[in-house]
Amino acid sequence: MRMLGRLLAGLMLALGLAAPVFAEDGYDLWLRFRPLAGNALSQAETRLGSVAAADAGSTAVTELTRGLTGLLGRPVPVAAGGKVLVGTADDPTIKSLGLDLSGLGNDGYVIRSVQDRTVIAAGTKTGLLYGAFHLLRLAQEQGPLTALSVREVPRIDRRVLNHWDNLDRYVERGYAGESIFDWHKLPDWQDPRYKDYARANASIGINGTVVNNVNANATILTRPWLEKVKALADIFRPYGIKIYLVARFSAPKEIGGLANADPLDPAVVAWWKAKADEVYSIIPDFGGFLIKANSEGQPGPQDYGRTHADGANMLADAVAPHGGIIMWRAFVYSHETPDDRAKQAYSEFVPLDGTFRDNVLVQVKNGAVDFQPREPFHPLFGAMPKTPLMMEFQITKEYLGFATHLAYLAPMWKETLAADTFRPKQGATVAKVVDGSLDGHKLSAMAGVANIGSDRNWTGSVFDQANWYAYGRLAWNHDLTSDAIAREWIAATFGPDRALVDPILSMMLPSHEAVVEYMTPLGLHHLMGRGHHYGPAPWVDGGPRADWTSVYYHRATKDGIGFDRTRKGSGAVDQYAKVWADRFDKVKTTPPELLLWFHHVGWQEKLSTGRTLWAELLYRYGHGIQTVSGMRRTWDGLKDKVDGPRWTQTAAFLAIQEREAQWWRDASVAYWQSFHGLPLPPGEKPPPQSLSYYQSLSFPFAPGDGK
């Protein structure tokens, strides 16, 4: 059979068909495992051609043989003496090798070349699964498979996806179709896609998923719905993934028949304890609850004059006997509009530092407003040393062009994780706060708001798959670079040919900065359309809350623009360590990228670039558009190297992105000129339409609004 395969390969070569381009739809994600060729195939055959394992039916062995079968183009046997040895620390064969397997925990693993064999060893079956996917990744990249010496232990304990999926399958801030969770058909019909979802998550180290929206419906805590959740938990378990649920704080009233949901009411305490016992009786390895409370109209402990700690601790006590955790979101703001919404979470949570139970994590967004294209790191990361803080990133691109704009988000996340809080001194990065190493917290976690939907390609576009991938890899190891993660993803998604990898990398790495420049340059923020957040709308004002409008944030006048958060303004700078507060308090020492986040600056004030603020804004808009134009040209040059369906969709989306980037520039310029009336700098073209035209545009059916 192998000889026949080689004869066919030779025939294809003679006919000029040796490197066929597969017609693909993106469903396989980065787990394509297309056949290797040449030296890469020869090396893989020599080092990975068969598998040996004491537990031949384990998920790790199943995934390893599945991947190798694709890469080698033939079935890979599991037999004694196999070239890849897979086993846990208590396996006699693994013990005999004398490998150092200490400190691997539940998820860690080692991969070693031992004589003519490749060994994957771990303390648990989950660790073996992660090791198997790591070895497959190495084979896909076509790097050397000899002299391997890999030791991996995740830096963060709980690596979780947050699905903002409603029970009717509508996805809030979702741009890839309906929810993949078909609750109406569960538990009886279990879509095979659920297993593929688990495989994809496990391959990048994600070990938890919250399957319902933070704006929760209490119904999911009723018995029939818990049976549906159990069906998912049973599918996910072999892949090391725990299920979590968002619990609506008012559930005792809504489904429990109680008069209130006061966390200090003994009847409420008893109800939650009984509910936790019920959940764990159905799903013994249930992870715990995520809570959004007293934010955007959601119920919470403040409704009864209680604190966030009162609410979190009551729930923590309910799940503690079962080993569960509570993830309590810090995205809060009061019913009354404060002087500066960016200060709200700090004001509410810092006084509570040290009062939360040991099994509570406070889940903090990367920035203090709301997943904007760029924000300074959230000041809470430098202000709560006695409380484990959990990072919340947004993978879905609510404010970054939805699924049609190419924006690789690893650089943005790395920017936040690498930020130095200077608490108590230099080197206290946000990453060290989140992984618990700075303050000695045993519990650590990271959440990513998922971008996954029912679209065949999972995320609405091929390049949005890269953000799901990058989130998982950074949650596992935040020291990985954006470049390294992108190279892995490109090799697995399109192939390891440098003629593909290098140009695609040149598109991805500057893409996030390009979006920032054509949407919200120099620290501007929250300028998107009302509600749906689609397109430019810096003119939005009025409505129920000032801090739901654009004008609240940009504060443009005839004389200048920007939110004054200095000590003479809202004072938000003093929520940071003194070294940052002093720097942010002055225009000249504030990084240009955050200038208008912290300062109200005159239109004609000269910046460090040598340009006036007005000219600098125009330059940034234009540079962002030029970057997108360059991305389009690069992609056009890859037409013969990428399969037709994925190339065509991406080309169409890049065209949309370029057109909408220009729209962002033109609409914004027209609006800013309505304030100051300044002429455009030389070489800058005026907007092709009037301001009233841009203001008249309406998008009532834009996706993901949640209403």
Image: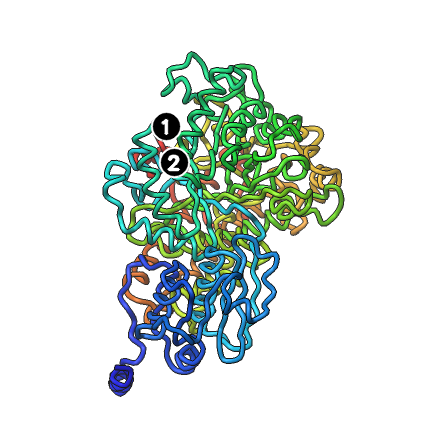
Circle 2: residue type: Asn
Q: Earlier in the sequence, mark 2 or mark 1?
A: 2
Cα distance between the residues tagged 2 and 1: 8 Å
Tell which of 195 and 141 is nearer to you. 195
Residue 163 placed where, x, y %?
40, 40
The reply, left or right, for residue 370 in relation to residue 252 is right
Q: Position of residue 167 (x, y in %)?
A: 32, 33
Callout 2 secondary element: loop
Q: Nearer the viewer, residue 85 or 353?
A: 85
Please, is residue 291 above or below residue 173 in the view? above
Quadrant (top left/top right/bottom left/bottom right) for the C terminus: top left
Residue 236 in view here: yes
Residue found at the far front of this picture: 92
Which residue occupies 42% across, 78% down?
40
**Position of residue 451 in the picture relative to residue 472 (left or right):** left
> Which residue is denoted by mark 2 in the rendering?
212
**Vertical comparison of 688 with 537: above or below:** below
- Residue 337, percent from left and from top: 54, 21
- Residue nearer the viewer, 681 or 377: 377
Mark 1 lies on a secondary structure that is: loop
Q: Quadrant of residue 55?
A: bottom left
Q: Name above or below for residue 318 compared with residue 411.
A: above
Residue farthest along the top direction in this orientation: 259
**Crowding near pointer 2: few (<14 within 10 Å), some, many (20+)?**
many
Where residue 496 sits in the image (x, y, percent)? 43, 71
Left-right relation of 667 to 385: left
- Say the numbered circle drawn on residue 512: none
Kind of residue at badge 1:
Asn
Residue with the mark numbered 1: 217
Q: Are marks 2 and 1 in contact (CB under 8 Å)?
A: yes
Quarter containing the N terminus: bottom left
What residue sits 53% from the left and 53% below the top? 476
